[in-house]
Amino acid sequence: MEITLKNDFHNTSVTLRLRGNYPTASQVKRAKKVLCGISGCTCSNVMGMRGQQDVKVMEEGLVDGELVPGFAL
């Protein structure tokens, strides 16, 4: 599954290719850096997303020992 996440405050987006419903820990870090790489900025959530998304954020799950959100189209 391929998803695109957005941050409407910084006008940024990132596309992730998921295997299943959860991103890997490295994908979470990459998304956060691309969507909002400003240290101390409070514009977004744990993955850097802000504003309306094309995917539904589901309950969180553990991936590589870290808590990450799941996604559904």
Image: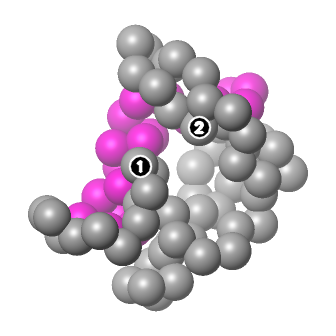
User: Which residue is at 40% across, 13% downward?
Assistant: 65
Where does the magenta region start and end?
19-37
* Closer-to-camera residue (72/14): 72
Which element carries disc 1, helix, strand or loop? loop
Q: Residues within 10 Å of mark 2 (few under 14, many from 20)?
A: some
Q: Quadrant of the N terminus?
A: top right
Q: Residue furthest left?
A: 39
In this image, 33 relative to 47: left or right?
left
In this image, 54 relative to 33: left or right?
right
**Contact? badges 1 and 2 (CB < 8 Å):** yes
> Of callouts 1 and 2, which one flags the residue occurring earlier in the amino acid sequence?
1
User: Which residue is at 22% across, 70% downward?
Assistant: 41
* Residue with the mark numbered 2: 69
| Residue 25 in the image, given as x and y percentages of width and height | 41, 30
> Residue 54, which numbered label?
none
In terms of image quadrants, where is residue 9? bottom left
Question: Which amino acid is tagged 1?
Answer: Val
User: Which residue is at 41% across, 66% downward?
Assistant: 44
